[in-house]
């Protein structure tokens, strides 16, 4: 599925001007470094650190992203798009149950960086832009496809729908991150959640 994110990599900044190859390379390097820096440092990270690690001047960073908030919004869009593509790649998996539960677990373990970036965005005075909201919605829809595939395969109970499953996913991600859960505790928590999502007859026979 082609989306506006795939067609227009500058959509989060509103920049519609054609970019030279070196400018595109700089932009991608800045985004890659910014995701690592803010994903690890959150509110304490800075654009100066991003510029230094990306090997560019701070003016180059702000030439691509006029504000810190614009940079963080672009990072979130890129992150959501990457996760959405991963989910779409699992849509034709031969084991729909493993695809759904595996991706659910991946989103939970991946959440710490996303939450840190989101908190840095709020601290920078930004909010979810239309581009960020669109990218987040597309990821949610891709998860919905995996959920429906797993239900058709009899791997997930039929009386669950995407809103409650996604709410459970978000809550689990935030709990795991903010409580700094030990990896073993997090994995046991996921096992309990997955047991709850399994068909009732399977739970009754186990």
Image (cartoon, helix red, strand yellow):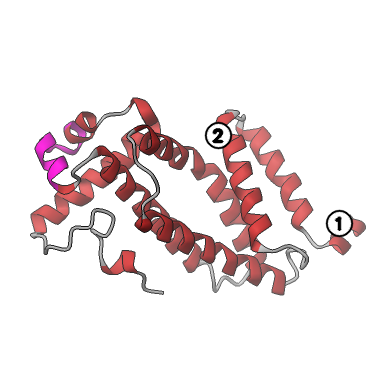
Tell me which residue sits at (38%, 44%) in the image: 127
Which secondary structure class fits the magenta region best? helix
Mark 2: which secondary structure?
A: helix
Q: x, y percentage for residue 82? A: 39, 57
* Magenta stretch: includes residue 34: no
Q: The residue tagged with tag 1: helix, strand or loop?
A: helix
Q: Is residue 171 left or right of residue 196?
A: left
Q: CA distance from mark 2 to mark 1?
A: 29 Å
Residue 185 drawn at (x, y percent): 68, 33
| Residue 130 versus residue 66 in the image, above or below | below
Residues packed near mark 1 inside 10 Å, few (<14), some (14 to 19) or many (20 plus): few
Q: Pick whichever of labels 2 and 1 is earlier in the sequence.
A: 2
Bounds of the magenta span? 52-63
Q: Quadrant of residue 187?
A: top right
Q: Residue at x 81, y 63 (%)?
A: 199
Quadrant where the C terminus sits is: bottom right
Rendered-image quadrant of the N terminus: bottom left
Q: Which mark is residue 203?
A: 1
Q: Is residue 18 above or below residue 73?
A: below
57 is within the stretch colored magenta: yes
Q: Decide which of 96, 177 is in the foreground and name it.
A: 177
Query: Horizontal and vertical percent for residue 7?
Result: 27, 69
Residue 91 or residue 62, whichever sits in front? 62
> Total label count?
2
Q: Residue at x 78, y 65 (%)?
A: 159
| Residue found farthest to the top | 44
Q: Is residue 153 left or right of residue 109?
A: right
Q: Where's residue 18, x and y in %?
A: 11, 64
Instruction: Identify the residue position indicated by label 2 in the image.
Output: 177
- The answer to which image quadrant residue 203 occupies is bottom right
């Amino acid at each position: 599925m082609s989306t506006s994110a795939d067609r227009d990599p500058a959509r989060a900044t509103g920049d519609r001007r054609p970019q030279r190859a070196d400018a595109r390379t700089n932009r991608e390097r800045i985004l890659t470094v910014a995701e690592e820096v803010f994903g690890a440092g959150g509110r304490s990270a800075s654009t100066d650190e991003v510029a230094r690690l990306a090997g560019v001047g701070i003016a180059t960073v702000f030439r691509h992203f006029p504000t810190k908030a614009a940079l963080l919004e672009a990072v979130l869009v890129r992150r959501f798009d990457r996760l959405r593509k991963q989910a779409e790649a699992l849509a034709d998996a031969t084991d729909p149950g493993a695809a759904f539960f595996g991706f659910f677990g991946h989103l939970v373990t991946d959440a710490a960086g996303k939450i840190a970036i989101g908190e840095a965005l709020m601290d920078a005075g930004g909010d979810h832009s239309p581009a960020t909201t669109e990218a987040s919605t597309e990821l949610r829809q891709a998860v919905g496809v995996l959920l429906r595939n797993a239900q058709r395969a009899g791997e997930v109970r039929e009386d669950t729908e995407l809103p409650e499953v996604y709410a459970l996913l978000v809550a689990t991600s935030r709990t795991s991150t903010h409580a700094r859960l030990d990896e073993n505790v997090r994995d046991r928590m996921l096992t309990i959640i997955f047991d709850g999502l399994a068909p009732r007859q399977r739970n009754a026979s186990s």
